[in-house]
Image (cartoon, coloured by chain):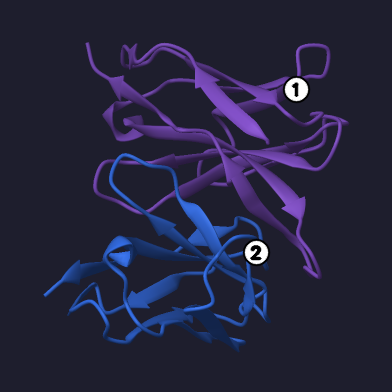
Chain colours: A blue, B purple
Amino acid sequence: EIVLTQSPATLSLSPGERATLSCRASQSVSSYLAWFQQKPGQAPRLLIYDASNRATGIPARFSGSGSGTHFTLTISSLEPEDFAVYYCQQRSNWPYTFGQGTKLEIK
Amino acid sequence: QVQLQESGPGLVKPSETLSLSCTVAGDSISTYYWSWIRQPPGEGPEWIGNIYYSGSTNYNPSLKSRVTISVDTSKNQFSLKLTSVTAADTAVYYCARESPLEKALVYYLDYWGQGTLVTVSS
């Protein structure tokens, strides 16, 4: 099973700042990686797929990069609604797995 | 607009069987893949398994001996059964659609149900 390790566990930033979230895979997942945003009481929402493609309706301030075992989600300028938990998920090998999440909180 | 809705008991006794259904609206279940994912309180999501409309399934090896996912095309529904549950199976259970997004290399989870909390307790 591929293990995804996200860092940091918690990121404290202010609106307007840039956020950089990391996801490392225990073995290569090529570009078969997605990023999700989850707010309390809601289902995860797809932000990025194939490591760098934005899903429909996702603002341009969200961008993804990486391939192989190291991936990054960047939010260029934080909006108040961006404070949430973010998960990476690999779609390379079954069972598909999620990271443990990064909580983005307001500083 | 695609909508998914989970339904089933919110409380299941230990050693019994958890049964949930997912009703799909706005799309035919005879397309793509359909998944069950669960999320224990305070933890990350865990993929339980998926099913293609033809009936072909994939199950997480950690749950494979206890899981059955089935599809009913006449009702546009798919279902989850998890046997011999314990407190460790307490989680929010989500159903979701996997589809080939624009320029995507593989299928991704693009539509999710709102989730249903299932508690295992006597």
**Residue A26 seen in render:** no
Residue identifier under label 1? B71
Question: Is residue A58 visible from the viewing direction of this image?
Answer: yes
Percent from the top left, x then y, of residue B92?
37, 34
Left or right: A16 with respect to B3?
left
**Quick one: B111 or B39, which is closer to the camera?**
B111
Nearer the observer, A32 or B63: A32
For the residues labelled 2 and 1, say whether their Cβ atoms are less than 8 Å apart.
Answer: no
For label 2, the SS is: loop
Sort mark 2 into few (<14), some (14-19) or many (20+) by Cα contacts within 10 Å. Answer: many
- B18 versus A7 height, above or below: above
| Residue A94 rendering spot, x and y as whole percentages | 65, 58
- Name the residue type under label 1: Val
Residue at figure coordinates x 54%, y 28% from the top left: B66
Please give the residue where the numbered disc 2 appears in the rendered image: A91
Amino acid type at circle 2 is Arg
